[in-house]
Image (cartoon, grey):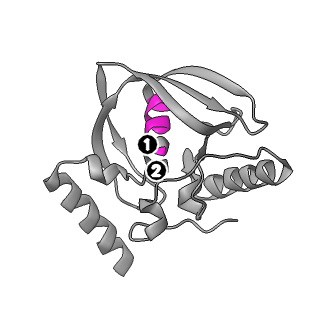
Amino acid sequence: MLDIFTIGADILREKASPVETFDAAFAEFVARMFETMKLGRGIGLAATQVGVAKRFFVVKLEDDEPGRVFANPEILMTSPEESSYEEGCLSIPGAYAKLKRPSQIKVQAWNERGRPFTLEAADLLARVIQHENDHLNGVLFTDRLSERSRERVLSDYEKRLRI
Ligand SMILES: [Zn+2]
């Protein structure tokens, strides 16, 4: 189980650097990230959230589907159509807000074995990829909210901390 850093931690504001080595240690770390994400009941987790400033994240929307690893991701295309969805983050537990994002994307990345792939994603998968990709650039979903919505979300989070 890895520690998940929460909002306020400097690592969450760092711009991560590329993954250069796809070795057994990397695959092992990725496996631990999937475990940590499952325990936290998340559907996406970026390396920066567990204290590693490297460009990779894991995504798993359902228990019965294989997880996906995105290393050195690049979003090649985003659709002009947007969709709105209640978004949350393991680094801001208990805080949720509706956020608009492009509803379809095309992304290129490398998997845990260092094999490149290109993926066209829509709906929730597209959203999670964009959310996790933001983490690699030090951006949190709250940064993309209106000021009013951001204040509400952060005060919800702080209230929850005091319980
Ligand atoms: Zn997040």
Answer left or right for 146 relative to 135. left
Residue underneath mark 1:
131
Answer left or right for 3 relative to 35. left
Q: Amino acid at mark 1?
A: His
Instruction: Tell me if mark 2 has few (under 14), some (14-19) or many (20+) residues whose alpha carbon lies within 10 angstroms of its own.
Output: many
Q: Residue at x 29, y 25 (%)?
A: 82
Q: Is residue 5 above or below residue 79?
A: below
Contact? badges 2 and 1 (CB < 8 Å) = yes
Closest to the camera, between mark 2 and mark 1, is 2
What residue occupies the far right of the structure in this picture?
24
Q: Residue at x 77, y 51 (%)?
A: 26
Instruction: Tell me if mark 1 has few (under 14), some (14-19) or many (20+) residues whose alpha carbon lies within 10 angstroms of its own.
Output: many
Q: Amino acid at mark 2?
A: His
Q: Residue at x 48, y 38 (%)?
A: 128
Q: Residue at x 61, y 60 (%)?
A: 52
What residue occupies the far bottom of the structure in this picture?
162
Separation of residues labelled 2 and 1 (CA atoms): 7 Å
Label the magenta part by its dominant secondary structure: helix
Some atom of ligand 1 lies within 8 Å of the CB belonging to the residue at label 2: yes
Range shown magenta: 124-132
Asked if the stretch drawn in magenta spans residue 103, the answer is no
Viewport quadrant of the C terminus: bottom left
Asked if the stretch drawn in magenta spans residue 128, the answer is yes
**Along the viewing direction, whichever of 158 and 136 lies nearer the viewer:** 136
In this rendering, does residue 128 appear at all? yes
Residue underneath mark 2:
135
Some atom of ligand 1 lies within 8 Å of the CB belonging to the residue at label 1: yes
**Along the viewing direction, whichever of 78 and 137 lies nearer the viewer:** 137
Answer left or right for 107 relative to 69. left
Viewport quadrant of the N terminus: bottom right
